[in-house]
């Protein structure tokens, strides 16, 4: 029997805010343990929560970018559970009245070739709600330590509908969702810092059936690759269980990305296990049209919309836009360079290939680069007008990346300007032809490659500064005479 996987993802995204969700204490990463705390975070007696407006703004922005319906009113609930990383023994969250409902994430599936755009489809969302993060436990031999620095950080949970049917689709979903969050300035989504975490709910059913099977929640998926590998592993496991006559048990499993194996953690909790009830210390949130409109005006163009526009407006191929667009700053850098030089494809090639290569080798971010859009634009113009040759342009780029000098200054300092004197070029070509009568005869008899015998002497005479295209044109004209 053929089985179909049915997958829903729960993605937790830490919001990029200066302070925590219900207190003024700073939110951050990498600080000494238990230093980003205060009486509210530690749930000391008598403390009361106060909502973070910046966090509310950012979840509304996320909802608008993802096409959600923004609730005119939502409330806060207490999700009760007992675990060492939760100092309150409950989590302030949203249960039956989330701030955002519906919406979708546009994904791109891998194309038949890496240089061709793949199929696009929309993954429907169930909801997005806001809550507070918990602390972090570190388990050692005979002891567990808790760091409450993360506790209370604004945390957005994005829940998809169970409409993902493969590990590759799940990977594409996370990649697209991360790009939207970064574009919108909502989160940096650094998984190493715990800013994006994912749980997957996975079940299988006979192909063609509409009913959902028994789901298993997969935890500890701390990279997109582990999400993809873990889902593929769990689907195979469930198919094997059912194929051998067994039944899939509803449970939570821990996936180890290093070994590629999973193990049972506990039976899966249901909503009633958490005994949700409205938080008595927090008032409901009302979002009016004016609030939504003020946020909508600051929403950026979505990544796939930008990619389609760049391909249509600038004629830049998919191979270039697929490199530029995932990084909003890089794609903005490209647009400025293209505007300045009027040759977008050439600018895109320099940025996607040479600039990214040098940044990677130097371990620098784009914001740290000495090369600006003006540098790229001026270099493109020098090459396109024949002022410098392509091999010299590579040397110029590396120099200006290291020094920050503009291309013209580098060319002048290094003496790299191409030889453009037509009289000298004709003399060099004539001398090369006169010195090699055999190649002249071969070329005139139809041996096309014989022309290459003249190019070496011409380029040596020009000290490598002659334009190969003009050399070829001049030689052909003289040989035809």
Image (cartoon, helix red, strand yellow):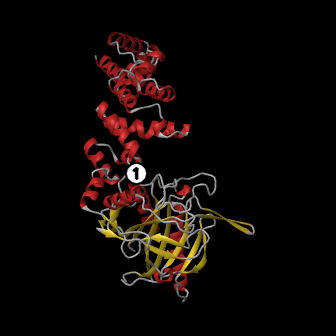
Task: Report the quarter where the C terminus lies.
Answer: top left
Q: Residue furthest front?
A: 46
In front: 430, or 198?
A: 198
Q: Residue 219 location in percent, x, y?
A: 55, 70
Q: Which residue is mark 1?
A: 185
Q: Quadrant of residue 50?
A: bottom left
Tell me if residue 353 can be seen: yes
Q: Is residue 265 depicted above or below 349 in this figure?
A: below
In front: 202, or 111?
A: 202
Q: Is residue 481 left or right of residue 34?
A: left
Q: Is residue 5 depicted above or below 47 in this figure?
A: below
Q: Residue 458 location in percent, x, y?
A: 42, 17
Q: Dot 1: what SS?
A: loop
Q: Quadrant of residue 329?
A: top left
Q: Residue 277 location in percent, x, y?
A: 44, 79
Tell me if residue 113 can be seen: no
Task: Report the quarter where the N terminus lies.
Answer: bottom left
Q: Which residue occupies 54% across, 65% down? A: 134
Q: Residues within 10 Å of mark 1 (few under 14, many from 20)?
A: some
Q: Residue furthest right?
A: 142
In front: 478, or 159?
A: 159
Count of numbered tags: 1
Q: Which residue occupies 38% across, 76% down? A: 96
Q: Residue 377 location in percent, x, y?
A: 35, 30
Q: Is residue 152 left or right of residue 427?
A: right
In front: 379, or 422?
A: 379
Q: Which residue occupies 33% across, 10% down? A: 423
């Amino acid at each position: 029997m053929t089985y179909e996987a049915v997958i829903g993802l729960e993605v937790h995204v830490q919001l990029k805010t200066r302070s925590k969700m219900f207190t003024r204490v700073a939110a951050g990463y990498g600080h000494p343990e238990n230093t980003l705390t205060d009486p509210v975070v530690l749930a000391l007696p008598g403390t009361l929560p106060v909502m973070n407006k910046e966090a509310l703004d950012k979840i509304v922005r996320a909802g608008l970018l993802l096409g959600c319906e923004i609730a005119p009113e939502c409330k806060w609930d207490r999700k009760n559970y007992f675990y060492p990383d939760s100092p309150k023994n409950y989590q302030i969250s949203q249960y039956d009245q989330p701030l955002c409902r519906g919406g979708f994430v546009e994904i791109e599936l891998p194309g038949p070739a890496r240089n061709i755009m793949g199929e696009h489809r929309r993954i429907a969302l169930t909801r997005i709600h806001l809550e507070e993060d918990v602390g972090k436990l570190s388990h050692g031999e005979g002891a567990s330590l808790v760091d409450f620095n993360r506790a209370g950080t604004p945390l957005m949970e994005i829940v998809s509908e169970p409409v993902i049917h493969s590990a590759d689709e799940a990977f594409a979903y996370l990649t697209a969702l991360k790009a939207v969050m970064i574009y919108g300035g909502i989160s940096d989504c650094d998984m190493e810092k715990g800013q994006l975490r994912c749980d997957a709910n996975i079940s299988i059913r006979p192909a063609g059936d509409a009913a959902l099977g028994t789901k298993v929640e997969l935890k500890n998926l701390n990279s997109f690759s582990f999400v993809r590998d873990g889902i593929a592993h769990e689907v195979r496991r469930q198919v094997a269980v059912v194929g051998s006559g067994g039944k899939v048990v509803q449970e939570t499993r821990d996936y180890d990305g290093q070994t590629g194996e999973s193990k049972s953690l506990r039976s899966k909790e249901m909503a009633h296990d958490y005994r949700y009830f409205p938080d008595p210390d927090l008032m409901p949130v009302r979002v009016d049209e004016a609030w939504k409109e003020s946020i909508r005006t600051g929403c950026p163009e979505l990544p796939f919309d930008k990619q389609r526009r760049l391909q249509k407006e600038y004629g830049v191929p998919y191979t270039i836009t697929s490199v530029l667009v995932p990084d909003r700053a890089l794609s903005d850098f490209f647009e400025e360079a293209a505007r300045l030089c009027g040759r977008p494809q050439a600018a895109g090639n320099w940025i996607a290939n040479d600039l990214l290569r040098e940044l990677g080798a130097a371990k620098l971010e784009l914001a740290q680069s000495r090369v600006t859009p003006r540098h790229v634009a001026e270099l493109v113009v020098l090459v396109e007008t024949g002022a410098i040759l392509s091999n010299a342009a590579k040397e110029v780029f590396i120099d200006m990346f290291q020094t920050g000098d503009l291309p013209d200054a580098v060319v002048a300092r290094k003496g790299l300007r191409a030889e453009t004197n037509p009289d000298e070029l004709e003399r060099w070509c004539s001398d090369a032809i006169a010195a090699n009568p055999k190649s002249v005869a071969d070329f005139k008899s139809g041996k096309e490659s014989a022309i290459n015998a003249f190019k070496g002497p011409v380029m040596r005479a020009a000290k490598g500064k002659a334009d190969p295209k003009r050399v070829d044109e001049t030689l052909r004209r003289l040989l035809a005479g």
